[in-house]
Amino acid sequence: MKWKISKHQPGRRRFMRLLGRAMVFAGAALFSVGLMGRRGLAAAIPALAGTNYDWTKHRWGFGVDATRCIGCLRCVEACKTENGVVRDAHHFRTWVERYVYLKGERKPQVDSQSDPGNIAASGSETEFRFDNRYQDAKIDKAFFVPKLCNQCEHPPCVQVCPVGATFRTPDGVVLIDHDYCIGCQYCVQACPYGVRLFNHAHGVTDKCTWCYHRITRGLQPACVEVCPTNARLFGDQNDPESVISKFIRENRTRVLKPEMGTSPNVFYIGLDKEVM
Amino acid sequence: MEALVHAAPYTGYVYPNETIIPWGILIVIYPYITGLVAGSFTVATFYHVFGVPRFKPVARFALLTSLAFMLIVPLPLLLHLGHPERALNVILTPHLTSAFAAFGFFAAFYVILVTLEIWFAFREDIVAMAQNQKGLLRRFYRALTLGSDEISETTRAYDAKWLKALAIIGIAGAHGLHGYVGFVFGSLKSREWWGSDLMPAIFLVSAIISGIAILILLYVVTSRFRKTVIDRDCMKGLAYLLWGFLIFAVVLEFLEFANIVYKGREGIETVMALIAGPIWFGVWVLQLGGSVAAFFILTYVIWRGTQDKQLIIGVTVSAVLVLVAVFAMRWNVVIGGQELSKTMQGLLSYTPPIFDREGISAVVIVFTLPFFVLWGLTRLLPPWLSHGRQAQGQIPSITS
């Protein structure tokens, strides 16, 4: 079918053609400006400044032995201090959960250091303590579970970021470029583990980086460093003799929410079925 | 710091970071407005593409309504962003695996498309006004003619064909835009209440009913202000359209809910507690009650062949009920999804702040703006057909 176009309107046709061209050019120009604005990834990571760290040589891994955790919360304290996390009961890069099975009950009581009762016990949102609420209770079983970013192999948070401000490094850590994050919080929604938090003062998302600024300098993450019982372990999965490689080899480990298809890199032992 | 965050109270166990609800009432209004865009465009296509003549009186007004709402759609998103000044990065450096990355392109494409559609639909009026108006307005309309002021049988046929072609693309565009908004929520596996394959379809159909409803309401209200008669056939057509899509929407929503309950995956007790707790009023009274009441009123009106004043009252009341029900649906999805903890063992309860960048006051302003824009658009491009001109066939007719 042919469009019937009057011969008396060359002006409009020419205008439309010009408009079309102008739009194509404008689009191309905007797109190339955008590409230029996108910096090389390694350069975007302040944590790597001044190191000769080669991120293709490592594959970091984290282990949690829940049977060893005593719920002292020094890890939470160390993390807040090391990473400048907002000191209140609603922003955590890492936290600890307490599971208590009371006698005769089939489901556990669960709380974390954020629980109002525990805040009351510590006296402030800036200090962390588990209260003694179960002192006189009959308990079948109880344990603590430290939580942190799983640095997933297939991170849903990276998938949903509309500008690519969050990314997975070759050594297996999910980071955020705070100078590029637009603060939409889509990643906060997408994380099945609730480990992403929003920094309202800076308008950007934040998360656990396994202390990337430390591990790239040969140090341990702050939470691992301060753990008095070695409940938290950290190392290079590329090195078969590292603590994490041995931990995974010598134990039957599990990850959290495997059904999400995220392939987490935090390996747990000593979890019960109710741990979510 | 304290003023920046509003921690939500909770029961059961929730992850510590979850106590700050990420998406508030602004993200409720965002899919609501997008839905009105898609829905009002649907009505226009029933005339421009499917050639249903009874929608002629509102077809052009529907296009303006769609544009007016579309122009405001980015506003709630911008208000929500932590760094609105970086918003353009979504278009400049889109991360293509993100459902959000498509928003800028979808939105820009749709705005251009509906603007072109409006231009062709109003071209004859623009040419006429370029000749009749004086002073600045005359210049404005002359510029709007884009240098083409010829009106003849040939140009009419040409305009009509473009109008139809653009509207066909527009069907895909408008519905794609809203189906995509459903995908933004439905594609997240992290939230049980969102991650559903039916979500885009539910969003789409509820968008259509809300768009038809707002058009009914605006048509009735503006007709009263203009002191003109409401076209009975048009009103009946809108009632049929609303009725049909409403049945479709309620059935889809029921199927979605039935799926969740029947599958009964881990944490189903918490899902049931959610609809019995934080969002019970929104789900059972506003969403379900509103939809069912609108259904019965419309069924009565259509069944009994109600005429005149009763017809108008019946259909308008149904339209208002549908608008409330769809808003409740958006709330139940967006807020409800976040009130259900990712632990599946706890419930949060969100209360929107009143005076806040993301509070009720902001939403009221955001939702009032499209009506001002629409008012402005109808002043510049009067969409209503006078009976005289309609008879003379001065408006490009698609059906012939």
Image: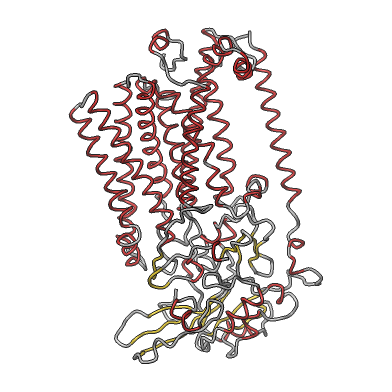
Q: Nearer the viewer, residue A226 or A129?
A: A129
* A46 sits to left or right of A20: right
Question: Quarter of the image containing the N terminus of chain B?
Answer: bottom right
Question: Quarter of the image containing the C terminus of chain B?
Answer: top left
Question: What residue is shown at x 64% (from left), y 11% (from top)?
Answer: A9
Q: Position of residue B388 (x, y in %)?
A: 40, 9
Question: What residue is shown at x 67% (from left), y 14% (from top)?
Answer: A11
Position of residue B328 relative to residue A45, above or below, is above
Position of residue A252 relative to residue B362, above or below, is below
Q: Position of residue B257 (x, y in %)?
A: 32, 55
Q: Position of residue A164 (x, y in %)?
A: 64, 55
Residue B71 quadrant: top right
* B302 sits to left or right of A243: left
* A141 sits to left or right of A53: left
Question: What residue is shown at x 67% (from left), y 60% (from top)?
Answer: A178
Position of residue B259 relative to residue A2, above or below, is below
Q: Nearer the viewer, residue B171 or A30?
A: A30
Position of residue B147 relative to residue A124, above or below, is above
Q: Position of residue B155 (x, y in %)?
A: 55, 11
Residue A240 quadrant: bottom right
